[in-house]
Image (cartoon, rainbow, N blue to C red):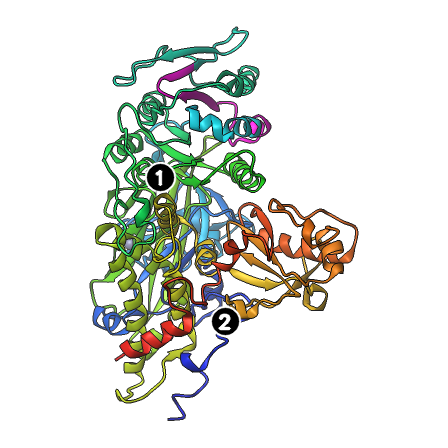
């Protein structure tokens, strides 16, 4: 009996404070050798739901955990070895890139760790340019690091590397103009034009659309851009063959003129139509010869011409358990996306809508072309919070690095097979993803099955290779290799679970389930996943059916908490009103966001910030002290009237200020004279010259350091109607028609057999 209550077992019902006060670290993969552990891929890039792989499918079945991988392949990295060589060393049989986990038969031959073929080493590989000696291949960077980038020789190109080409599609319908986004967009573009990735060959173009298509010729010698309007949107054509996409450097002044002119030109429109489909068809024609990136700014429901949709949201269904219309209304956008993908064109969406725009349908243009989708619901230029979020997101988008005409292939050791991919791409063949663009903010998931007994293997490997053209016209291959040991006992497998990665994969699987079956089936599958894992653990402990409690191993103790939280996520919640577009976008995020952001959207990080002077401190890179307050569980029980609490939701940071917070905190940290001065549009904490303010800024900057751009901030007074935005994130509490975490555990207890 004592063995059960050893260090590793917890009874969830006896653990009211389950959340660690510091960040949950990914579990370590132990390969038995320090050098190999050090060489293994970073969990920030490549993560498996288990740190040990079951040796048979039957064992995996017994563990009742999903087996799969999450990958963030083009993440911005601080350190990346780049190699230029004449010959890239790859297995002759399975084309795996040489990596730290191969074995050397002798100094001239290596054994592939995926298919076990023995390969010859080229002469070049045995030479160490540092010591100028031959014979020790393990000194090579390919053998010392699991993440590496090659500059590809000519045989990796089907054509000369394409230049960076950017086309902007701009909705100028009445709703679009009323939202006021156009002027903000043009101003940010004017500021960032010089920072867009590219070189002397970079091309740019613009197309505006309402019920017609408005082309802009930027021909050499023009005093100002020349507008050409095409009224026929049923059968699109280009009004001129040239000067719609132009060299950015040569025509910079004309481009700047156009960006100043656009808001004026369409400022007084009454055109209520938005011909998105026709605009996308034109974009495909314009970009086809080169490939590149199309960025769409859409504010209204596309209601005219090809691809037109009608409003099909039933507002009475917003909180229903059965939500209709999660799937596209037509296949126009998916089909066009596949045409775009074939021509190396990706389409990204910025949706700045005030009404339903049918994201379920129009998102197809991005999902199947390797694009991304950004959403700013209820956008109005008069709302500072929304404007701040839009500007930050747009700046990051315009200046982040980009890869063109990319493909990604994921290989795995013989006996394993990858069967389902999650993310935005087109699957060209079983393991080859076509990515017309690749972004450093895009992540992917895949499910893995065990096809053959792995008992002869000590370890298995996964290798992802991303081949792309850089914005400077270089063909490059980024390779990540992850090595995982194989285990043969149920106990070993269950104790190897990576609960955060499991949740990430389950979320993606649940989105698919919602689309293929129904929202209630998806919710049931999530609950069953929690029940399954608790039941499997109970079975592994060999306990009779009479025993009480909900036992979990340390590595899975947060899984039930995360699952109870995800049932309240905008993607899957029922009972509280959720607009259809918002729900669909939440589902898209679960399929495409990197794991840390995804976890913060499910279970945000909450910290007290009214007493930062009493907290532990670390020193940041700028040698400033950063206070580290303890993370709190997401329940109103943790809030106090005299406190202030920060909620890091990943893509936004919310601060709730209690009514009795100290005057010093208000004056010094927040820089307001009194409580009532915290307005509903408080979205920037001023920089003041006092320690309290510096501590708060250092802490917020520290949280932002982990993000691709600083999260928009919203400070909320406890007696403001906005407090609901904060309170609905307290997912451990009972919300309208949804169970509290404690009630959820009671439900699990009745189900665990
Ligand atoms: Zn091989």
Q: What kind of element bears circle 2?
A: loop
**Which circle's residue, 2 or 1, is located before the other in the chain?**
2
User: Residue extending furthest right?
Assistant: 689
240 and 475: which is toward the camera? 240
Residue 193 highlighted magenta (yes or no): yes
Q: Judge whether residue 649 can be spotted in this image.
A: no
Res 665 → quadrant: bottom right
Which element type, helix, strand or loop, lies under badge 1? loop
Image region (quadrant) for ligand 1: bottom left
Residue 501 x/y as whole percent: 39, 62
User: Which image quarter is the C terminus in?
Assistant: bottom left
The part of the chain drawn in magenta is 190-215
Q: Nearer the viewer, residue 562 or 367?
A: 562
- Residue 734: quarter of image: bottom left
Ligand 1 within 8 angstroms of badge 1 C-beta: no
Residue occupied by mark 1: 370
In three-dimensional space, the C-alpha distance between marks 2 and 1, rounded to whole angstroms, equals 36 Å
Q: Is residue 227 above or below residue 747?
A: above
Name the residue carrying label 2. Answer: 19
Image x and y of residue 396, in percent: 53, 39
How far across and how far down the image is residue 661, in percent? Answer: 69, 62
């Amino acid at each position: 009996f004592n063995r059960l209550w050893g260090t590793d077992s917890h009874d969830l019902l006896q653990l009211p404070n389950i959340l660690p006060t510091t960040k949950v670290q990914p579990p370590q993969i132990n390969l038995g050798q320090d050098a190999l552990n050090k060489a293994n891929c970073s969990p920030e890039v490549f993560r498996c739901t288990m740190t040990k792989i079951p040796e048979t499918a039957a064992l995996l079945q017994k563990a009742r955990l999903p087996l799969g991988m999450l990958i963030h392949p083009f993440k911005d990295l601080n350190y990346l070895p780049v190699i230029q060589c004449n010959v890239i060393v790859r297995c002759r049989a399975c084309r795996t890139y040489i990596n730290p986990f191969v074995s050397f038969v002798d100094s001239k031959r290596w054994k592939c760790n995926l298919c076990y073929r023995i390969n010859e080493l080229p002469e070049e590989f045995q030479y160490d340019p540092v010591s100028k000696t031959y014979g020790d291949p393990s000194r090579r960077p390919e053998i010392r690091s699991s993440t590496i980038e090659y500059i590809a020789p000519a045989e990796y190109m089907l054509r000369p590397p394409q230049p960076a080409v950017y086309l902007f599609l701009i909705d100028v319908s009445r709703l679009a103009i009323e939202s006021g986004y156009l002027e903000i967009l043009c101003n940010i573009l004017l500021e960032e034009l010089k920072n867009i990735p590219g070189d002397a060959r970079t091309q740019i173009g613009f197309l505006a659309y309402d019920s017609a298509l408005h082309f802009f010729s930027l021909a050499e010698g023009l005093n100002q851009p020349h507008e050409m309007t095409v009224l026929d949107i049923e059968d699109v054509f280009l009004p001129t063959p040239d000067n719609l996409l132009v060299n950015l450097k040569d025509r910079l002044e004309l481009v700047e003129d156009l960006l100043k002119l656009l808001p004026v030109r369409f400022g007084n429109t009454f055109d209520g139509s938005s011909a998105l489909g026709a605009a996308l068809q034109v974009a495909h024609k314009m970009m086809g010869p080169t490939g590149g990136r199309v960025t769409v700014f859409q504010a209204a429901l596309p209601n005219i011409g090809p691809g037109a949709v009608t409003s099909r949201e039933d507002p009475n269904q917003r909180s229903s358990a059965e939500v209709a219309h999660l799937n596209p209304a037509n296949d126009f956008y998916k089909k066009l996306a596949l045409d775009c993908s074939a021509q190396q064109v990706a389409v990204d969406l910025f949706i700045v809508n005030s009404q339903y725009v049918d994201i379920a349908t129009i998102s197809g243009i991005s999902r199947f072309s390797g694009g991304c989708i950004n959403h700013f619901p209820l956008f109005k230029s008069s709302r500072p919070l929304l404007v701040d979020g839009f500007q930050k997101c747009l700046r990051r988008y315009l200046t982040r690095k980009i890869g063109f005409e990319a493909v990604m292939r994921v290989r795995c050791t013989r006996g394993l097979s990858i069967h389902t991919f999650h993310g935005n791409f087109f699957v060209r063949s079983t393991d080859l993803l076509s990515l017309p663009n690749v972004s450093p903010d895009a992540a992917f998931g895949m499910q893995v099955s065990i096809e053959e007994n792995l008992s002869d293997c000590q370890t298995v490997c996964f290798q992802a290779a991303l081949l792309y053209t850089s914005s400077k016209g270089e063909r490059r291959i980024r390779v990540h290799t992850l090595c995982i040991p194989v285990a043969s006992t149920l106990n070993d497998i269950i104790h190897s679970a990576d609960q955060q990665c499991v949740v990430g994969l389950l979320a993606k699987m649940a989105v698919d389930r919602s689309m293929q079956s129904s929202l209630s089936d998806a919710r049931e599958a999530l609950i069953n996943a929690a029940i399954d894992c608790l039941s499997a653990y109970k079975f592994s402990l060999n306990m009779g059916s009479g025993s009480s409690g909900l036992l979990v191993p340390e590595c899975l103790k947060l899984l039930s908490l995360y699952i109870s939280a995800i049932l309240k996520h905008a993607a899957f919640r029922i009972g509280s009103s959720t607009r259809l577009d918002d729900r669909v976008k939440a589902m898209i995020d679960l399929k495409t966001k990197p794991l840390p952001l995804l976890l913060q959207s499910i279970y945000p990080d909450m910290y007290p910030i009214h007493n930062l002077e009493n907290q532990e401190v670390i020193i940041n890179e700028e040698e400033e002290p950063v206070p580290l307050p303890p993370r709190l569980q997401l329940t109103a029980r943790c809030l106090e009237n005299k406190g202030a609490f920060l909620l890091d939701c990943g893509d936004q940071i919310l601060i709730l200020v209690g009514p009795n917070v100290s005057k010093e905190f208000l004056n010094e940290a927040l820089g307001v004279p009194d409580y009532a001065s915290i307005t509903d549009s408080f979205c920037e904490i001023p920089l003041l010259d006092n320690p309290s303010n510096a501590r708060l800024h250092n802490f917020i900057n520290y949280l932002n350091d982990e993000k691709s751009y600083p999260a928009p901030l919203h400070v909320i007074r406890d007696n403001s109607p906005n407090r609901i935005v904060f309170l609905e994130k307290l997912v451990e509490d009972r919300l309208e028609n949804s169970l509290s975490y404690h009630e959820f555990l009671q439900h699990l207890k009745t189900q665990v057999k």
